[in-house]
Amino acid sequence: MESMWNSMSPQPWSFGELFDALRQASVYHIVIEIVLIVFIIRLLLTKSYPIEDDELTEAEKDELIKDWQPEPLVPDTPEDHPGLQPRVVTDQTLTTLVVNGKEGINMGTLNFLGMIGRNETKEAALKACRKYGVGSCGPRGFFGTLDVHLYLEERLASFYRVEMAILYSYGFSTVASAIPAYAKRGDIIYCDEGLSFPIQMGLLASRSNLKFFKHNDTDDLQRMLEDQLVEEKKNPKKAKVTRKFMVIEGLYANYGTIAPIAKLIEFKYKYKVRIFLDESYSFGVLGETGRGVTEHAKVDINDVDLICGSLETVLGTMGGFCAGSNYVVDHQRLSGIGYCFSASLPQLLASAALAAIDCLEADPTNVCYHLMSIILSLQRLSALGHCFSAFLPPLFASAAHAAMDCLEADHTNV
């Protein structure tokens, strides 16, 4: 044992052995080492940049200043540039606008059910403005939560008949914040090719593995889900930690088509996929009482894991919301970026939304069917979309109402 330990211990060396090693080394090897040592010493002792002590004379400074021609902060703009001649709206009604003194039909509005301009919403907004002011000046988690926000969340949850709803101050940020609050890197999201731009931003923010299926094509989606089952059998350990989501719209903004929600719910339970449903354009206009695509298809709303919606279409105000179970929705109060870091919805807009919900529940009849039937009865005019939906590309419901009056008065001027 002692002899083994001695053989393993380092042996002492002498300068004689060092000189012998130098004599045996090749000349070019020694030269390269000397050059490197000299270079390192020079690098340590010299400054990284030379210091110039020369200063410009007064004559040289004057000459440089004389030759300097500064560029304008703003380039020359022609007088007829559109930016210098903004279009000013001086009056607005339910269906018309007065722009630069000219009255015309507002064909670009999302005021589906005509809530903008109703006396009920106006009075509610004015009353809230007198009571609260014009803004909250803070996010919901700090000092931006007021009683009107809690009332609106309760009304939205009650309207959808779910446990909880959460309120956002901007419709775009609602779904763009909700998706990355749940889906993370490594998860799989099955997405329809026709999803709107806010949803696309939320998908990118999630950094998940995105798999797009053809628009409203359940066969293509099922093929992808079956392929994923095959992959999961190859690596069951990874499959246990991989979450799968499905992101769809109830009424697609880019197509005006309705999602086959009943078939998608069937896939949810068969392939263990969570469903995120955006009802920004179906909320308030689909279903017998406006409760969206789930009511229209007569499926249980609890089969959808999370519902996102916008207050900027049917209710004629600003903001958005998410609705669902307590366990799912409450997670966004600490994980929803748009909820945590944005100022809360102004109180006057929340009050206007509450008044709009009252109007919607007081008159649940589907005015969209009536509007579409009248439009289709007019000569030389056709409309796209569904007869039971307010989303009629390119004609919206409130604007179509004004267009009907004009066309009925003069069928020749189309």
Image (cartoon, rainbow, N blue to C red):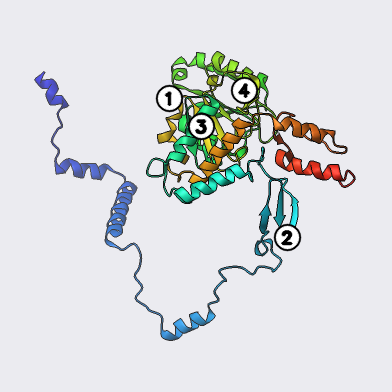
Instruction: Tell me whether the residue at label 3 lies in contact with that at label 1, contact meaning CB atoms closer than 8 angstroms.
Output: no
Query: How far apart are the alpha carbons under marks 2 and 3?
Result: 40 Å
Of residue 144 and residue 37, the one placed in the foreground of this image is 144
Q: Which residue is mark 3?
A: 155
The amino acid sitting under disc 2 is: Gly
Relative to residue 320, is residue 292 depicted above or below? above
The tag on residue 205 is none
Front of the two marks 3 and 4? 3
Q: Which residue is mark 1?
A: 327
Residue 65: horizontal and vertical position, in percent? Answer: 49, 80
Query: How far apart are the alpha carbons under marks 1 and 2?
Result: 53 Å
The tag on residue 295 is 4
Front of the two marks 3 and 1? 3
Instruction: Tell me whether the residue at label 1 lies in contact with that at label 2, contact meaning CB atoms closer than 8 angstroms.
Output: no
The amino acid sitting under disc 4 is: Glu
Mark 3: which secondary structure? Answer: helix
Mark 1: which secondary structure? Answer: helix
First reached walking from the N terminus: tag 1 or tag 4: 4
Query: How far apart are the alpha carbons under marks 3 and 4?
Result: 18 Å
Of residue 179 and residue 305, the one placed in the foreground of this image is 305
Query: How far apart are the alpha carbons under marks 1 and 4?
Result: 23 Å
Q: Which residue is mark 2?
A: 101
Mark 2: which secondary structure? Answer: loop
Q: Residue furthest right?
A: 412
